[in-house]
Amino acid sequence: MTVRTWHVWSVFALAAVLAAAVAGGRPGAPTVSNAAEPTIRSVQLAVELASGDPVLLTFEVRATDAAEADGAARRGLAQLAPGSRVVEPEPGSVTAQWGRWSWLWDDSEIPVPIAYNPTGAPPTVSPQIVVAALQTWSTVPTSKFAYRYAGVTDRGASMSEGLADGENVVAWAKLDCSTGCILGVTSKRTVHEADLVLNSDPAAEIVDGQDGTNDARTVILHELGHIAGLEHSCPSPFGPCTDAERAAVMYFQYRGVHRKLAEDDIAGISALYPRSSSQPTPTPVPGATPEPPKPELPVVLESGWNLVVLPAGDAATIAASLFCTTAIYDFRDGAWARWIPGAPPAVQSLSALDTGRAYWVLAWEPCAHVFGG
Ligand SMILES: [Zn+2]
């Protein structure tokens, strides 16, 4: 488990190890005679924007070696933030340079709002996958950390702008994939703002689905871990990494579909944002102190898809109260569960709704219901 926030020395240590590996190979590593297969590598750059504003960027790059990954990251930077420059700190200046970025989200900022700009998204990637990834990081019982889906925005990620725009955004941009291919870039500013840009170039092959080269949910889940403040589970590609670190969403390499947090991810987010014993857990314990009565609030559905917090209880009863409900969907345990009013039992995979959880509800017309407190 690695829960430190970024330190420049780790980047330089990593760069040195990578350089050594490129030059001579790792002692004891199996010799590979064929040309190297591209793998997904992480490149971190401290950048001064044209405005002088500092920003930290973590690129996930598909490349055959570290040099190609670094080159692709720098080309992507030129595309995303023209006029910026990479800060190459001198030895000894490291701590002061990077101290400013080792922030975590404050209690008052949690749940951290994340907006989504679907402009340019591949056709198979729907906003639901962003919501699903947000929800996955937001439902760790031992951590107080949570994201909040702030809806669709027309703002882009602001890393190309001199000033932070105050909004955390997941957006798409078409980034050059000719030599090395950036899949995603996470930016973290000195003020508490983070953005994520995903590569919409078809060559990046970010799709929603188990068969995809790069499963969008997996990529977004990993990047949201960085935005929360997590480093890679095993920071050096040459380890030794434990099995638990290798199983983590925050492992430094993409190894297929990983849509659930692993033990190491849960330990990491819980270490950064522990849930104190006085805070309510997301899953109520039977026999525990009852929650204070909530004010009665109407649940309002518009035609089409709605992301709403529903009261706890039986899905069928709740769907009957909200008469316009066509379906209730919930992303849990790596798959969508659903309740469809009137459908045969074999089709239903969602029966009980939990407190404080947001559900996707498809409505065929607008309707609302005030659930009793
Ligand atoms: Zn990463």
Image (tube, rainbow, N blue to C red):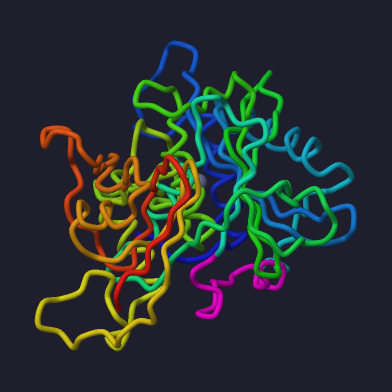
- The residue segment tinted magenta is 95-112
Q: Residue furthest top?
A: 34
Q: Is residue 277 left or right of residue 36?
A: left
The quarter holding residue 367 reads bottom left
Frontmost residue, 10 versus 308: 308
Magenta stretch contains residue 350: no
The quarter holding residue 175 reads top right
Image position, residue 136 (x, y; %)? 36, 53
Image position, residue 321 (x, y; %)? 29, 57
Q: Residue at x 85, y 48 (%)?
A: 84
Image position, residue 361 (x, y; %)? 38, 47
**Quadrant of the drawing holding the C terminus:** bottom left
Frontmost residue, 284 versus 169: 284
Task: Tell me: residue 25, above or below residue 249.
Answer: above
Q: Residue at x 54, y 72 (%)?
A: 105
Frontmost residue, 65 versus 40: 40
Q: Is residue 160 left or right of residue 282?
A: right
